[in-house]
Amino acid sequence: MKTNRATVGRTFRLVRKHSVGHLVRSLNPLARLALTAALTALLCASSASVAETGTGVWTRSGLQGEFITSLVIDPQNPNTLYAGTSVDGIFKSTDAGANWSAVNIGLAPNDVGVLCLAINPLIPSTLYTATRRFAGATGPRLFKSTNGAGSWNLTAPFDGVSLVAIDPLTPTTLYAGTIGGGGIFKSTDGGEEWSAVNTGLTNSFVTGLVIDPLTPNTLYAGAGFPPGGVIFKSINGGGNWTALLSGDFATQPLVIDPMNPSTIYAGTFPAGVFKSTDGGVNWRFTSIGLTNPLVSVVALVINSLTPTTLYAGMSAGVFKSTDGGESWSPLNDGLTDLHVQTLAIESVSPTILYAGTGDGVFVFQEAPVTPPGPIPTLSESVMMLLAAFLALVGVATLGRRKAQSDGGRKDTSRKTTSAG
């Protein structure tokens, strides 16, 4: 960049020395327009080279030293983030992770071990959190905030909550998965009243839960641990559950393709990623490239605009797939802590990804897509601009000379006539 800037400086000093203002004023309107276009192209080329800086690599986003257990992004304002930690409660950022502040009002001192966070997609000032209790207290509890985590209130009369899933179309309907043997509970009034919805759920230790974004009465749940892990499905809002897949695994994250909800991905321990393309009827193993010896996937997110792109978090870092989970490759440049616990991806700009690790939050932005053909360097752009400029100056000079010549001939003609 120093060489490019020096080239730019020398070029413009040279042009200024030769009275660039006078030359530009001498150009006709069409030539001035062409010169303006060339200048715009140069600025765009230099801006593109700057825009690529800092992309394609993980950078710290704060909370260093904190063990991050959960992350959510405000779907309407992606600069607002929430992070749950293992011992210090919940933190909030309103500047895309540059700064964080604790938001634990209403959480008791023994309620600050956060297991999950969930955010209302239509009213993002409403959030839910399940917390693990310390000091010999009873199991995890569920809290709700209606003021952007300004304060929290207990919203479930039962313990053991580890997961919360919110109906994306009717967010007053939500489901709570428990790890204390209570199975799944459902509320249709924003968490005021709850009822158990466990018919057909043969294992009540719930480890994963997701709602179909287009048909919210369809849900998938993971339950149990190896060797008795099971994935269940309900098509009537939890009224009944049917077992889809069982085996020597524990299902952790479940994600659904937002454009084709019959495609579901299940991250498991220790069996990696499973995929179904027919609503859970059939499943197959899709973990090629995942290098963790146990292939334990604890986090899984999907690009909402390009759903063949997924990211998996595990104890070996972050892995990316661009072919619908068929193959995976590591995405760990700059990630100084590979023990990834949670992932969050922006819905507005799904090229921005956050990772919660055992040592704080990291952020990653995908490099911009390179257009076809080579992009000129800044030095090349300057040379092209200078050549175009000099060509235009030459045209203007020839135009002035032609005008002077024509004017001279006209004057001679007038003199000849008057002499006659």
Image: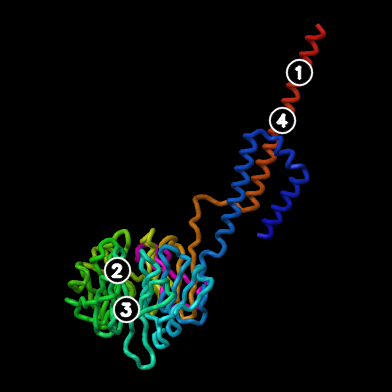
Distance Cα–Cα, label 3 vs label 4: 82 Å
Distance Cα–Cα, label 2 vs label 1: 88 Å
Q: Which residues are magenta?
A: 320-346
The quarter of the rendered structure image containing the N terminus is bottom right
Q: Which tag, 2 or 4, sits closer to the chain's start?
A: 2
Instruction: Say what secondary structure mark 2 lies in.
Output: loop
Q: Badge 2, how many Cα within 10 Å: few under 14, some, many 20+?
A: some
| Residue 406 picture location, percent across and down | 73, 21
Q: Residue at x 26, y 65 (%)?
A: 216
Is there a contact, CB below 8 Å, between mark 1 and mark 4?
no
Question: Which residue is disc 2 drawn over?
Answer: 172
Q: Is residue 160 rendered to the left or right of residue 377?
A: left
Q: Amino acid at mark 4?
A: Leu
Q: Amino acid at mark 3?
A: Thr
Q: Is residue 263 rendered to the left or right of residue 370?
A: left
Q: Badge 3, how many Cα within 10 Å: few under 14, some, many 20+?
A: some
As drawn, the label of residue 409 is: 1
Q: Amino acid at mark 1?
A: Arg
| Residue 233 picture location, percent across and down | 22, 71
Q: Residue at x 28, y 83 (%)?
A: 158
Q: Is residue 296 among what the camera can see?
A: no
Question: Which residue is disc 4 drawn over?
Answer: 398
Q: Residue at x 27, y 79 (%)?
A: 206
Q: Which tag, 1 or 3, sits closer to the chain's start?
A: 3
Q: Residue at x 28, y 73 (%)?
A: 175
As drawn, the label of residue 155 is: 3
Instruction: Say what secondary structure mark 1 lies in.
Output: helix
Q: Badge 4, how many Cα within 10 Å: few under 14, some, many 20+?
A: few
Is there a contact, CB below 8 Å, between mark 2 and mark 3?
no
